[in-house]
Amino acid sequence: MPFKIVRNDITKMEVDAIVNAANPELKMGGGVCGAIFAAAGPEELQRECDRIGGCEVGQAVITGAGRLSAKYIIHTVGPIWRGGGHGEAKLLASSYINSLELALKYKCKSIAFPLISSGIYGYPKDQALNIAVSSIGEFLMKNDMDVYLVVFDRSSYKLGEKLFSAIEKYIDDNYVDARLDAERSRRLTRTEEQMMRGSDDYPAAFGPAGQAAYGPIDRAVRRLADQAEYGPVKEEEIHLLKSAAKPVSPRHKKKRRLEDIVGQLDETFSEMLLRLIDEKGMTDVETYKRANIDRRLFSKIRSNREYKPSKTTAIALAIALRLSLDETLDLLARAGYTLSMSSKFDVIIRYFIEEGNYNIFEINEALFAFEQDLLGA
């Protein structure tokens, strides 16, 4: 996995290099710094740091890792938060980039970071997280390395309030409880079929929400309409259906020619993926880096016509190719998957596709915040 956010104790990470959120004097401190010194062997590590002498803000130095399982400790000094108008963002990004460049110089294949400056240095956690993700993402588009951002508990992790609220609202408007879906799983009646075709002959209780102009409604939500044939529909269920039956944006409702669809019916996941890469004018390297998967996994997919990826890998590749929702569903179907409104993970993926946001690292930020699996290998 090229980049992954994990909840763990950074001193227990099995990586080549662990990053220490250091102070300029390279002295044993509190928080992450104190924990790393204690685990590595404080006296020995302090002697190494004293020989170096110090480190400027935004820069990075390297020492041995003492008793840790890692080979190296990279010490970087993040900025103290002073309101944001003193170049803090640039200095914090430099801490990540210089640490990664140093790891690259020492031929490290894996590295684990804490959320630098977000502790006693007071950097707002949501802004610190955004800079960490964007800096690491920028590096990984040009280099190969397994990078982990390690958070100790949920209180040390905060997604931007605006994005969190937008996703939370989208989930509230679109998420269908899995139990509700199961209760209605057998009611695939004439009403549902009519709504799928966009027929005008839908139950009056649902008003204009069922008209064809609103596009197809997710299967789990469409089943609610079936209740009209068996008795009164609860008001909250009508509201749920109307919420899901939103107009489909033209930019996400890409039309494909019938002859193309018919001609591609027998494509496997691998064949469709390779065709789409060519159609999008992308290279293999660009594709697997944007998908946050490693070269070895991509090579397996390319070389095996019948390869079936995990769902997170399949979605990651759809994100890398910036596919529309229709194209994404088609690609996923080749691997036996879909996106359901009864899965919070799937609803979050739909949110980002509908918003036209295909930054896999930002998507993984959101998935982690909502305690869902991350995209990639």
Image (tube, helix red, strand yellow):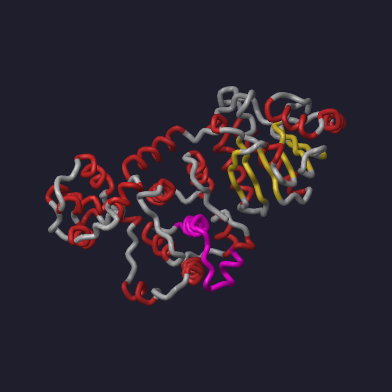
User: What residue is rendered at 81% in x and 29% in y?
Assistant: 42
Q: Nearer the viewer, residue 221 or 123?
A: 221
Q: Quadrant of residue 8?
A: top right
301 magenta-colored: yes
Q: Is residue 194 above or below residue 127?
A: below
Q: Quadrant of residue 123?
A: top right
User: What residue is rendered at 15% in x and 45% in y?
Assistant: 232
Residue 357 at x, y percent in the picture: 44, 48
Q: Is residue 117 above or below residue 245?
A: above
User: What residue is rendered at 64% in x and 23% in y?
Assistant: 120
Residue 218 at x, y percent in the picture: 30, 54
Q: Is residue 99 visible?
A: yes
- Whether residue 78 sits left or right of residue 125 in the image: it is right
Label tally: 0
100 magenta-colored: no
User: What residue is rendered at 40% in x and 40% in y?
Assistant: 167
The magenta span reads: 298-322
Q: Nearer the viewer, residue 241 or 213?
A: 241
Residue 76 at x, y percent in the picture: 72, 34
Q: Is residue 57 visible?
A: no
Residue 24 at x, y percent in the picture: 75, 27
Q: Dominant secondary structure of the magenta stretch?
A: helix
* Image quadrant where one finds the C terminus: bottom right
